[in-house]
Amino acid sequence: MSGHEHDEKRFLEQVRQTLDREAADLAPETERRLENMRAQALERAGERAWDDLGQQGRMSWIMSGLSSWRVAGPGLALAAALVLALSLGLFRGEGAPERNRTAERDAELMEMVDLLGTVDDPEMLEMLDDMDFYTWLAEQEEAS
Amino acid sequence: MSQRYNVDTTRLDGFLRSVERRALGMARIAVGHEHEALDLVQESMLAFASRYAMKPEEQWRPLFHRILQNKIKDWYRRGAVQGRLFSRLSPAGDEDGRADPWQSVPDPKESGPERMAQSNDAARALNAALADLPRKQQQVFLLRAWEGLSTAETARAMGCSQGSVKTHYSRAMSALRGKLEDHWP
């Protein structure tokens, strides 16, 4: 290891130790809040899970459509959603190498994280909770 | 109708315990306020647990941090709109009564008085230097150096390329070492 690399390693170790010390020594009320947060998260585990790429793909399709709905109206919203679905490879055929499919699924999952993170409108959340109709609608579009 | 999946809550609990303190530290360094940082971490935990906890475990860490980074980004956007960004740039203990978060740096438990003073100074200097970094450099550095994510995982968490991660990290390292050489030569 060169001198520079050794210095950098030592510096990083000092940074980590300092930050770890702070993280370990939280105020009692902060500790309690973290406990409560964790308990709440465990209670809600899996409530809105999206399991397979098909669901994720339909979800991003639907999200794009729903967010466009207010601005452009239903017809343009569906068109915009189809464009997004195509760009996310919802209708991708067989044949892509497994490694590329894994990387692409990973990227699509992160896209979903970003999309779902923008939803804070109660009306939108209510729609998301009632996905049966929208899933059926997406399947009709896929079939056509 | 949402479908509830079975999640191994024991493993999920272990994971959340393993990330929550560093997540809080990262959020606090980003937004400069403990209560707001706690809110961001809470929202991230809830979103992660409810939507993504049934994903393979090797995806959990970058997924959780992607959610947290999005929350931090949103906080900045809201702050820019509400003018909070300008108050964040003002000196610590600013006019709207926000406390200086670095005042709460704890005393180390097992050192003598002189080492405790030096350690507090170093901790304050580190937190100040991190707070001064541009947000992306700051968060990339913390994800790589403190959370221990790989370059690829950090890129997924930040939504950028691996090349960008390397650039942000390198710039952050250079800036931090320059500012902290008096404390850690």
Image (tube, grey):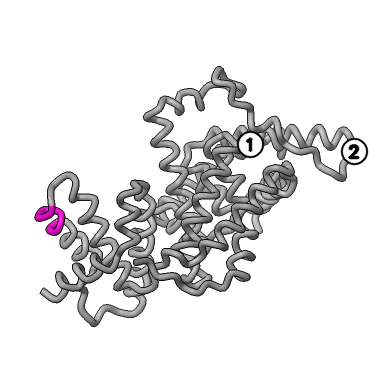
Q: Quadrant of the N terminus of chain B?
A: bottom left
Residue at the disc numbered 2: B112
User: Do dots 2 and 1 share one subunit?
Assistant: yes
Q: Main secondary structure of the magenta part?
A: helix
Q: Chain of mark 1?
A: B
Is residue A75 covered in magenta? yes
Q: Earlier in the sequence, mark 2 or mark 1?
A: 2
| Residue B169 left/right relative to B20 | left
The residue depicted at 87 percent of the width and 33 percent of the height is B114
Residue at the disc numbered 1: B127
| Kind of residue sitting beneath label 2 | Gly
Seen from the viewer's position, the closer of residues A68 and B158 is A68
Seen from the viewer's position, the closer of residues A110 and B6 is B6
The residue depicted at 45 percent of the width and 24 percent of the height is B86
Q: Which residues are magenta?
A: A74-79
> Is any atom of residue B146 visible in this view?
no
Seen from the viewer's position, the closer of residues B141 and A4 is B141
| Residue A28 left/right relative to B158 | right
| Residue A55 left/right relative to B74 | left
The residue depicted at 73 percent of the width and 41 percent of the height is A27
Judge the density around disc 1: few (<14), some (14-19), many (≥20) Cα neighbours within 10 Å.
Answer: many
